[in-house]
């Protein structure tokens, strides 16, 4: 294990938490980061004390974060459901996994023709389908539910949205927090009690009420300790669904 990975583990688990199973992902992340113009200039001693990266810096100097690595495959929207579902994805900001159905410019007639079992997309787009259903312009049998695709700089699902989707579609709402390239970073389970994440997807930290993100899947444009602008906290308690790992408590507003 090289210096970079040792530094990463020291930074990720400062209180001696078990890092087993994540060293391979960190190795790939560190190799990708050190290939970028932004991180290439860091001295060896600076790697163990990497400061948070402002979001505006990442946006304005995006080319400096290009590692040249291949884009990682994007996990299917709704991939965490055990049973296969016919998921229709509306206007995503990322390229979908092979075989997924996407509609860039949805219409009520088109949606009814496709007959999806689940509907997914940014909340702004999904709200439009709920309005159309409430006005009897759209009728869908969403037996699996509605998946809200959330991310940095994206809109959040609110409690009134959940009520609206249930009233018009009788469909529960699930959330998937996706990265800039569409990588899955956190998701909502059937308990609807926070967003699950794991050490092989992302590294999350809290800093004065803000969530910091290090995506382990976006090796093309790696960003270490990125300030997300997302208000929230990390919950390490056990979820009622029984899944291990942390959950994100995001303040949706």
Image (cartoon, helix red, strand yellow):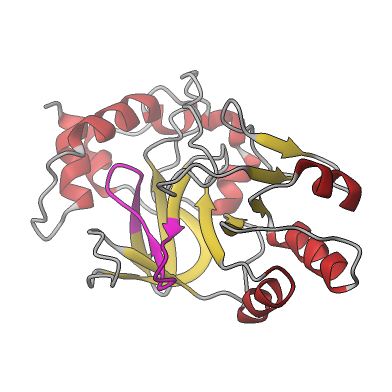
In this view, the residue in front, 75 or 22, is: 75
Q: Position of residue 106 (x, y in %)?
A: 84, 46
- Residue 63: image x %, image y %? 60, 29
Where 38 sits versus 135, above or below? above
Direction from residue 205 to residue 63 in the image, left or right: right
Q: How many marks?
A: 0
> Where residue 37 appears, x then y in whole percent?
48, 26
| Magenta span main SS | loop
Q: Residue at 10% across / 50% down in the picture? A: 18
Residue at 18% over, 40% down: 7
Quarter of the image where the C terminus is located: bottom right
Query: From which residue to which does the magenta span run?
Result: 187-204
> With 142 as the anchor, is 32 left or right in this view?
left
Q: Quadrant of the N terminus?
A: top left
Q: Residue at x 34, y 34 (%)?
A: 42
Near-viewer residue (33 or 57)? 33
Q: Is residue 93 on the magenta stretch? A: no
**Looking at the picture, does residue 19 appear above or below residue 69?**
below
Q: Is residue 178 above or below residue 147?
A: above
Give how far across and how far down residue 129 sits, in percent.
80, 61
Residue 167: quadrant of the picture: bottom right
Magenta region includes residue 196: yes
* Lateral position of residue 15 relative to residue 48, left or right: left
Rendered image quadrant of residue 22: top left
């Amino acid at each position: 294990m090289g210096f970079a990975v040792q530094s990463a583990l020291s930074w990720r688990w400062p209180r001696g938490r078990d890092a087993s199973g994540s060293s391979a992902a960190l190795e790939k992340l560190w190799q990708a980061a050190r290939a970028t113009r932004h991180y290439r200039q860091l001295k060896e001693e600076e790697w163990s004390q990497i400061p948070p990266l402002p979001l505006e810096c990442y946006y304005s100097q995006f080319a400096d974060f290009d590692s040249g690595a291949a884009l990682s495959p994007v996990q299917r929207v709704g991939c965490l459901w055990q049973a296969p579902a016919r998921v229709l994805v509306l206007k995503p900001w990322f390229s979908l996994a092979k075989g997924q159905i996407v509609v860039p410019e949805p219409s009520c007639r088109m949606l009814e023709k496709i007959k999806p079992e689940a509907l997914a997309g940014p909340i702004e787009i999904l709200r439009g389908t709920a309005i159309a259903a409430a006005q009897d312009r759209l009728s869908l049998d969403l037996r699996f539910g509605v998946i809200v695709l959330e991310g940095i700089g994206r809109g959040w699902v609110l409690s009134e949205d959940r009520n609206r989707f249930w009233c018009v579609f009788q469909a529960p709402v699930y959330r998937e927090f996706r990265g800039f390239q569409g990588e899955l970073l956190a998701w909502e389970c059937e308990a609807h009690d926070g967003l699950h994440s794991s050490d092989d997807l992302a590294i999350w930290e809290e800093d004065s009420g803000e969530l910091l993100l290090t995506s382990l899947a976006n090796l093309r444009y790696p960003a270490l300790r990125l300030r997300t602008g997302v208000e929230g906290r990390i919950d390490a308690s056990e979820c009622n669904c029984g899944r291990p790992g942390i959950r994100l408590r995001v303040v949706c507003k």
